[in-house]
Every structure is written in structure tokens, then in C-alpha cells.
Amino acid sequence: MGKRIISQARGHGSLSYRVRARAFIYKIKYPMHEGNAVLIKLLHSAAHTAPLMKLSASNEVFYNPAFNGAVQGQSMTIGGNEIKPGNIIMLKNIPVGTHIYNVERNPGDGGKMIRTSGSSAEVYKRYDHNVISVLMPSKKEVMLNGDCRATIGVIAGDGRLLKPLMTAGKAFYKYKTRNKLWPRTSAVKVNAVDHPFGSGRGKRIKSKIAKRWAPAGRRVGHIAPRRTGRGN
């Protein structure tokens, strides 16, 4: 009798395959009112790759990714048109060529794009009908409403991926924080009871196409692939 393969165990959501809820206690958002904000504290969040700023504005506390050069006690502006790192401004009031991050996809959603450490987008073009083009880090152009807000500057924490993990334990806890499976083991290397591709017999590996409606223990390999094999 076999046992649950990894894809089944992850779907079941045991303690081994469940993200830590306390890692996501800080929610990034923008306040709905304009005014001044003060940087109370710089924080580390296990759920985010960048350090976070704890900001206070009109008795409301909110969190935003920290920018390069952020200092505790620093003052920032919500609204207006002053181009200064940390200020939260509407896209229509930001000059072309300015680096921005934590960009709203729709006005008032609190920021959904460009939130990883070391990243930033750029205000690229202006169009009629209050449409602003933003150049993403991937060099892709995205059209947004001019009333969407963004933070001026570049997110802190650049070079995070350059630092080696050094030990397997550090890698384990890094991926566990985000509910990622590590270490990853090839299916053909495990025991026969652990995976349909397992055991040491017949390691002549070919592409295997799983049936769309196969049960979880058999739904492994290529699932409804558009094509397999090497292209001509």
C-alpha cells in the first residue's frame, strides 16, 4: 500500500506544507486621505523580501516597502506633487522618467505592483484621457489610470540574491517561510510508494502526459500540455 505523494500532501495542507500565518501580519496599503506621514520604524517582515516602513499619518498607521535612504523619523507627503523619495503621489502628477514603486493597479487599491526588494518602475509616457504608461522592470509597458498612486524612489534591499545562503538549514527556512517545497527531489529518484515515477527500475525517462481528470495521486507529469518534446 502506498502513501500520499508530495503533490497530495501539499494539497492537503499539513503542518509541513502550510505557510506561517504570523509571517503575514503586516499588510501593505495606502491611506485614503492626503497629508503628512512620519516614519516611525523600519521593520523586517518574513513575508516580504524588502524591509518595511511603519508610517503614521493622522492617527492612522500603515505599512509601505522602505526606499533606499529611508531614515527613522523622516517625514513624507501623501498627495501633492513634490518629487521626493518616499512621497506617495498620483501618477498624473509624477514627471516622466521618475522611478516609482508599489504602484496601484486601480485607484485606491493600496498598491499591487513593484514591491520586491531592489526593484522600481519608471513613468514612461503620457496619453490622452488621463492614461499613464509605466515601464516595468521587465521592460514591458503597462497602461494605468492617472489617478493611481505610487511611491517615489527605489525599494531598499538590492543585492539580496547576491548573498549566498551557505547552509542547507538557511535555505530550508527561507523557503518554508513562503510555503515553498525544499529540497526539491526528482520524482524518478524516490521510492515506488512515494510517486508513480519512483523506483530504480526503468530510468529511461520520457515525457509523460497526465490525464486531465486523473486523481491527485496519478495527476503527475505534463498536465494538458500544448506540446512536448524539442521544437524543430
Image (tube, rainbow, N blue to C red):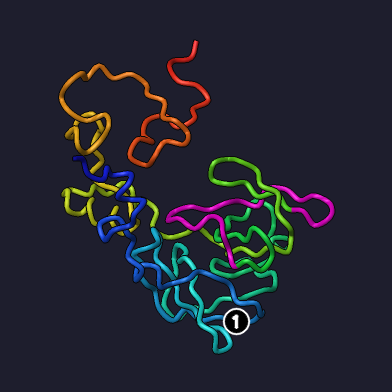
Q: Magenta residues: mostly which secondary structure?
A: loop
Check disc 1: other Cα within 10 Å, few if <14, some if 14-19, many if 20+.
Answer: some
Amino acid type at mark 1? Asn
Give the image location of residue 167, x and y in percent: 16, 49
Query: Foreground residue, 16 or 69?
Result: 16
Task: Give SS at disc 1.
Answer: strand
Query: Foreground residue, 70 or 89?
Result: 89
Give the image location of residue 138, x and y in percent: 54, 41
Q: Quadrant of residue 147?
A: bottom right
* Magenta-highlighted residues: 110-131
Give the image location of residue 101, x and y in percent: 55, 58
Seen at 54% across and 45% down, the residue is 137
Residue 44 seen in the current view: no
* Residue 128 shown in magenta: yes
Seen at 73% across and 57% down, the residue is 145
Q: Is residue 107 left or right of residue 38?
A: right
Looking at the picture, does residue 65 appear above or below residue 71?
above
